[in-house]
């Protein structure tokens, strides 16, 4: 009786903290601008290929396969975690055994995946700590980023050790009583290491590993939203809601479209704004966190900090200041900094902005909009969209493009073309060479 009570209490605390965190994020999302989504059938296909099929991760065969196995293993082990919650609340043991042969497949694959994940995580930690992998470095990769990654990897390691320990002692205990359910191809071998242990000790160790595993899950679930490993939760929705247009497509700004429509319609051009409609557009482009769309913010939360985007960025490779990973991490950091103030007061200002205090003009103009970063990102983040939106702010609100672009803009305005010639002179080059204008 005491076990279900203790379990219910720890589950309640976990849900309470998680609900508080979720509310905080929902409030942050409320600060953002709309972003249209549709075409759910195609979205579902993209989610199955990119998120569940891990198609982009698998472009790197060895590391990609290891990561994909960890992800698929998590999905299988999740079923076992749900079973533990049922067992914990109702005092049952291995409640999902009612699934019969399916249960054998679930337990066997979960047991094997636990070992695979354990080995993969050790390999990931060795790579991170002892090998100088370029994509794990960069100005945005501060000490805290590495600590964050190592903490999450250590927790996953402990989760797998406790899972295998729990299965091994369950196997010993249940085998002795003849009431074993499920199949444990890995743990049954681990169990042999403890052969001869008294029954009471086996039971006690099973309880220790059971509690250790479920409490680690609860702790992990509440640490994740504050870590880069939040992508465990956010990557699937981010891929589902990703942009479906071809890479490189730049959408028109709805505010500009609206303005042009108004100008073309004499009835609207001079009409007074309708009730509830603002006559002045708040801002063109993105200057600070309240200008981003909810998709920009979802991108920032889904970023795994893997560095695949920066690794292929031609600007970064050629020594420019730009790192697409940094831009995405900056969005997340700025929301963390300014978001709480804005939640309490829509007019809150702290004298800083995403533009310049986080992302400099130099970084923005270094981007060639080649889209290599967006093509490579395993969770379908679109970096150029926010880079271009910040540029739009600079050009449209502050007239601060690079010198060459400003000259082009002036020419387009004055001559209707990017060149510094009057439209009347445009065909001068053809004079005397028998070409009709
Ligand atoms: S933006 Fe994408 S590719 Fe870049 S670090 Fe984040 S998850 Fe990796
Ligand atoms: S689109 Fe910009 S940020 Fe992305 S890879 Fe190309 S240059 Fe780098």
Image (spheres, rainbow, N blue to C red):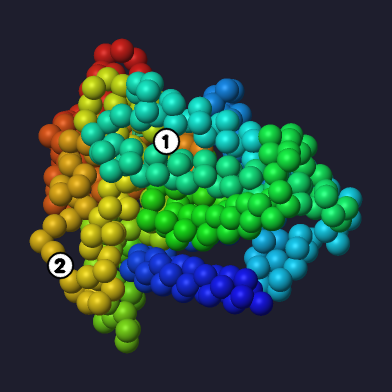
Q: Is residue 179 left or right of residue 285?
A: right
Q: Residues within 10 Å of mark 1 (few under 14, many from 20)?
A: some
Q: Quadrant of the C terminus?
A: top left
Looking at the image, residue 79 lies above or below residue 141: below
Looking at the image, residue 183 lies above or below residue 4: above
Quarter of the image where ligand 1 sits: top left
Nearer to me, 6 or 216: 6
Nearer to me, 398 or 220: 220
Q: Quadrant of the N terminus?
A: bottom right
Residue 67: percent from the left, percent from the top?
56, 34
Please tell me which of labels 1 and 2 falls first in the chain.
1
Q: Can you identify the residue that label 2 sits on? A: 349
Q: Are marks 1 and 2 in contact (CB under 8 Å)?
A: no
Q: Quadrant of residue 197?
A: top right
Instruction: Please tell me which residue is depicted at 83% across the width and 50% down the height of the picture.
Output: 176
Q: Residues within 10 Å of mark 2 (few under 14, many from 20)?
A: few
Q: CA distance from mark 1 to mark 2?
A: 32 Å
Residue 103 at least partly seen: no
Q: Is residue 297 left or right of residue 232?
A: left
Q: Is residue 172 left or right of residue 410?
A: right
């Amino acid at each position: 009786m005491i076990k279900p009570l203790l379990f219910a209490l720890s589950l309640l605390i976990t849900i309470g903290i998680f609900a508080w965190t979720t509310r905080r994020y929902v409030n942050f999302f409320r600060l953002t601008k709309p972003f249209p989504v549709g075409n759910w059938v195609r979205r579902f296909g993209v989610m199955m290929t990119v998120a569940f099929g891990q198609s982009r991760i698998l472009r790197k065969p060895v590391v990609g396969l290891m990561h994909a196995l960890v992800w698929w293993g998590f999905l299988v082990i999740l079923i076992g975690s749900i079973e533990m919650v049922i067992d914990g609340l109702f005092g049952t043991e291995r409640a999902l055994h009612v699934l019969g042969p399916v249960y054998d497949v679930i337990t066997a694959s979960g047991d094997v995946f636990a070992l695979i994940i354990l080995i993969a995580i050790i390999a990931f930690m060795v790579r991170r700590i002892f090998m100088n992998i370029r994509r794990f470095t960069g100005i945005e990769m501060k000490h805290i980023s590495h600590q964050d990654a190592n903490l999450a990897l250590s927790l996953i390691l402990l989760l797998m050790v406790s899972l295998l320990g729990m299965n091994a002692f369950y196997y010993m205990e249940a085998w002795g009583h003849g009431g074993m359910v499920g199949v444990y191809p890995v743990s049954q071998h681990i169990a042999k290491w403890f052969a001869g242990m008294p029954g009471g000790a086996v039971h006690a160790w099973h309880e220790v590993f059971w509690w250790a595993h479920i409490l680690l899950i609860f702790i992990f679930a509440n640490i994740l939203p504050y870590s880069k490993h939040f992508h465990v939760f956010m990557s699937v929705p981010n891929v589902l809601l990703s942009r479906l247009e071809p890479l490189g497509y730049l959408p028109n700004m709805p505010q500009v479209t609206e303005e042009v429509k108004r100008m073309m319609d004499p009835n609207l051009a001079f009409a007074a704004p309708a009730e509830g409609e603002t006559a002045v557009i708040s801002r063109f482009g993105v200057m600070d966190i309240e200008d981003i769309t909810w998709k920009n913010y979802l991108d920032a939360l889904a970023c795994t900090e893997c560095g695949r985007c920066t690794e292929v960025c031609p600007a970064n490779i050629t020594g420019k200041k730009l790192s697409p990973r940094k831009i995405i991490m900056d969005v997340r950091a700025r929301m963390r900094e300014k978001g709480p103030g804005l939640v309490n007061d829509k007019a809150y200002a702290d004298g800083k902005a995403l533009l310049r205090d986080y992302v400099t003009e130099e970084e923005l103009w270094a981007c060639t909009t080649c889209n290599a970063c967006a093509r490579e990102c395993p969770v379908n983040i679109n970096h150029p969209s926010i880079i271009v939106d910040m540029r739009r702010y600079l050009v449209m609100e502050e007239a601060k493009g690079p010198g060459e672009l400003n000259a082009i803009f002036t020419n387009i305005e004055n001559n209707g073309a990017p060149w510094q010639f009057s439209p009347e002179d445009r065909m001068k080059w053809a004079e005397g060479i028998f070409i009709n204008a």
